[in-house]
Amino acid sequence: MLSMSSISKVFRTDLIETHALRDFTLEVKAGEFLAVTGPSGSGKTTFLNIAGLLEPYDGGTYRLDGVDVTKLSDDARSQLRNEKIGFIFQSFNLMPDLNVYDNVDVPLRYRRMKAPERHKRITNALEIVGLAARMKHIPAQLSGGQQQRVAIARAIAGDPKLVLADEPTGNLDSLMARQVMDLLERINEMGTTVIMVTHDPELARRAHRNVQVVDGQISDFRPYEAPIAGGLAHARTEQVAGAGA
Amino acid sequence: MFAYYLQLALRSFRRNPGLTALMILAIALGIAVCMITLTGYRAAAANPAGERGAILFSPSLDSWDPDRAYDEDDKTLAPSMLTYRDALALQRSPIPDRKVIMYKSGGIYARADKGMEPTYFATRMTTADFFAMFEVPFLYGGPWDARADQGPEPVVVLSKESNEKAFGGANSVGKTLRWQNREFRVVGVLDQWEPMPKYFDVSNGAFQDLEGAYVPFAWGPLLELGSHGNTNCWKTEAINNFQDFLNSECIWFAAWVELRTAEKQRAYREFLDNYVTEQKKHGRFPRPLNNYLYVVDGWLARNKVVEDDNRAMLIMAFAFLAVCLVNTVGLLLAKFLNAAPAAGIRRALGASRRDIFWQHLTESGVVALAGGMVGGLLGVLGIWALRAWYGRFVDEATRVLPFDEQNFVIVVAIAVATGLLAGLYPAWRIGRAAPASYLKVQ
């Protein structure tokens, strides 16, 4: 589904260069649920932005669902992003002046779908997240958990092959976090590949596979069997080939 | 997608009503000022003779001072008026299809039955062809004929306003008015007629009121009626009586000829040159041969009827529109960049740069459309205000350039084009914004 090979990304200012990703190599199979962890500033979000075709990269190769995205035009990248990827953000990123229905409608509009098809997909997605009765509500009238469920509905309405979730439970309490996680698992069970960036070891443990990003490179390690005192950062890490070993 | 962009634009306006109103106002003011100035300018610069402007000619002969050009700013120009002798000589030419000589005089008119207060009417001393040549409309009666010029017969044509003052607006044809101790019979009353500019006599003010009465030219010398307009002289001459004045080198007469064919135009030019060459033999026309035959447009340009300050005003109006445009660009930029996070989210959800660009350009276009409509209404109000302030001139301007539905559409179209122009850069900027930076809350 996703294949990155030796990806590098450097942020430059007049004074300094920051290597956000270096020699970053990762394969994610279709239908997989991958958790990406790592300390702040390690490059997790940069990876997610590149994976979501939101950020260009400086070197390496990236294939998404068999398509080499390196030399695609902005229009082609946008179309690919719209058709194959769904985004879920920590801060939900709903449009505050659009109601639930219209928020979910946004990605479908850019797919130039006819209104009846859009309506079908929107209602279906909202039913999946349990918010079909709140279509006319604006985000401010919803709780944080409900807002994130709207964001999930928006992400899946277009039936993407890949969902990228950046700290999807970071702004939620534990109960709502669990509900959101349940939803992600359900989406994954329906065949959608999910890549989730998280700081939460408990959530990471629910993924099929975890990778840890440290200093712009990845470490691969097996699913958790039990929480380890002292956190995740250095637990049972196995360096993988091509990841700066 | 356009309908969607339109929907988003309207939502955006609801989100920022104050800023949106400011942008609409900026465009509206610029458009209104331009519209009002342009209306005035085009009215002033219009050729009121229409297609006939190409066959009506004003001759100009250089009878001026050998040591000093008539116009020090443009030494090539000949005087814009004629001497009495030259006017009469031109009037004798058989070449023109129609010919007119004239000057501006005036006096107090009264009715023998004392049915009106004695009133001053500026009076145009002219010849019979004047009315046909300048397509003067008549409400009652008509012009006098060529025989009346010869007599001369005591006939008068009144303007509509003068007839209103003298006879309460009734059909006064056949009635008489007393002027210069003679009874003048009314043969015609003009309908509303306001050529703008008053191109046939720009020497006495292209935007001055029209005369209230028209009397055969020959009465001028006969009754020794002096000019109530401009008179220019360059030569020291002994002028002891009115006849001396008529025979002097002073200029105060206007002449127009109608020459319908190129052949006649060529022949008339030749006639002018021959006439001046002949006069040189009699010691007149001391300057080199320098005759002109102006069509109406050329005549207006030669006399700088559309003054430089009018043009400057027009330029300033467009400069003001440009300032409004720059302000709108600034406001749009501020608004769009403020909405950059939303654009970032849309990019993440599949919008291309092109989508974001068109979405915001549509918003600019809608702002401009509203600005154009408000500007159009402000323009109409402005023209009404000017009409009330300046009276007939703006009224005439509005007639020449009526502000009808078609003009409204043109104004709105200009505003939309302006707004789209103003929106190009902000829309491009927001389209280029990196979406990733707006998506993560740290």
Image (cartoon, coloured by chain):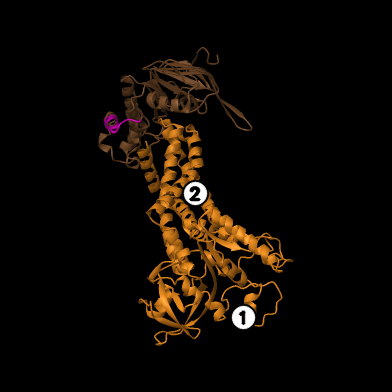
Chain colours: A brown, B orange
**Residue B71: x %, y % from top left:** 67, 64
| Start-end of magenta stretch | A112-123
> Secondary structure beneath disc 2?
helix
Mark 1 highlights which residue?
A: B242
Specify whether A75 is left or right of A11.
left
Specify whether B19 is left or right of B201.
left
**Residue B384: x %, y % from top left:** 42, 64
**Residue A114: x %, y % from top left:** 30, 31
Specify whether A224 is left or right of B204.
left
Against A69, residue B69 (above or below) is below
Could you say which quadrant of the image residue B185 lies in?
Answer: bottom left
Label 2: how many residues lie within 10 Å, few (<14), some (14-19) or many (20+)? many
The residue at 69%/68% (across/down) is B284
Going by the numbered disc 2, the residue's amino acid type is Thr
Disc number at residue B328?
Answer: 2
In the image, A76 versus B19, the foreground residue is A76
The residue at 64%/60% (across/down) is B273
